Image (cartoon, grey):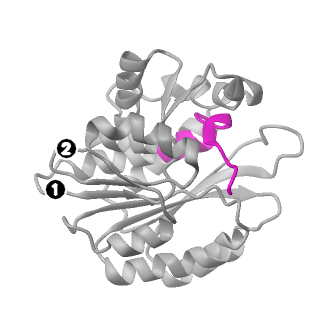
Amino acid sequence: MLSYQHLYHAGNLADVQKHALLCVMLDYMTRKEKPLTYIESHAGRGLYRLDAEESLRTGEAEKGIGALADAFPADHPYRHRLDEVRSQWGQTAYPGSPLLAALSLRDTDPLHLCELHPQEHRILTEVLSPWGAHIHKKDGFQMALALTPPTPRRGMLLIDPPYEVKSDYEVIPTHMANIARKWNVGVLALWYPLLASAAHIGMLAALSERFPDALRHEVRFPVAKAGHRMIGSGMFIVNAPYGTADEARRIDRIFHST
């Protein structure tokens, strides 16, 4: 059984990059009246408490959203969602990507979420059930392949695995290629860690060969704790919506100003 729980890391610098890009992409996509499908392969629990013991133990949220929230203007989609969540659940609440998506989507937009960890799956179900989300307890890559092409065909897949299984770096390019073959119009967004060991390099080379026109955005930051391997965060986006590259440059300025 996989043991990763994002509560220790929620709201960290990697989340800020990933979630800011996600909110901007969904904001653009929902401006059109046409419905869309949102799929997430590794959803987590959807809602986190930054005053929880696990979060306070690492201090990553304080260095992440705690330091950077005010760098986003009040009308920014990410800031708007943060304010919504804090208004409903309190100032120490932080939304995971499933909740950010649910708040961004419309009633006509199906929401499919996958989570294998029993505790995370239970909490995810409790948090997202008011939005009528389809919550799956199965392998996220298998679910994504089975669901694509979805109805509506327009939409996005977020792939955000914990990379506990080392083979993920080897198999993800093939998974994404198989999904893209079935769903060539879908926005495929992959989050990945930048590692001191450079374990991500081969995966990115394979992805870039398969998707030469994809948007790749990376930010670097100090390790959260001595001995940690993650030195940054990346997003690899196939069929990136208009304006995503501009948002990536804005995020660069925010990270460089801290």
Is residue 7 shown left or right of residue 127? right
**Can you identify the residue that label 2 sits on?**
106
**Can you identify the residue that label 1 sits on?**
35
Would you place residue 167 above or below residue 226 in this image?
below
Residue 10 is a magenta residue: yes
- Give the residue at x 63% y 52%: 233
- Give the residue at x 57% y 29%: 65
Q: Position of residue 209 (x, y in %)?
A: 55, 84
Is residue 158 shown left or right of residue 201? left
40 and 200: which is toward the camera: 40
Is residue 157 shown left or right of residue 203? left
- Give the residue at x 75% y 50%: 231
- Give the residue at x 76% y 26%: 57
Report the amino acid beneath label 2.
Answer: Arg
Residue 33 in view of the camera: yes
Assign a secondary structure to mark 1: loop
Quadrant that contains the C terminus: top right
- Marks 1 and 2 close (CB-CB < 8 Å): yes
Q: Earlier in the sequence, mark 1 or mark 2?
A: 1
194 and 55: which is toward the camera: 55
Report the amino acid beneath label 1.
Answer: Pro
Assign a secondary structure to mark 2: loop
Other residues around mark 1 within 10 Å, as few (<14) / some (14–19) / many (≥20)? some
Residue range of the region highlighted in magenta in the rendering:
1-19
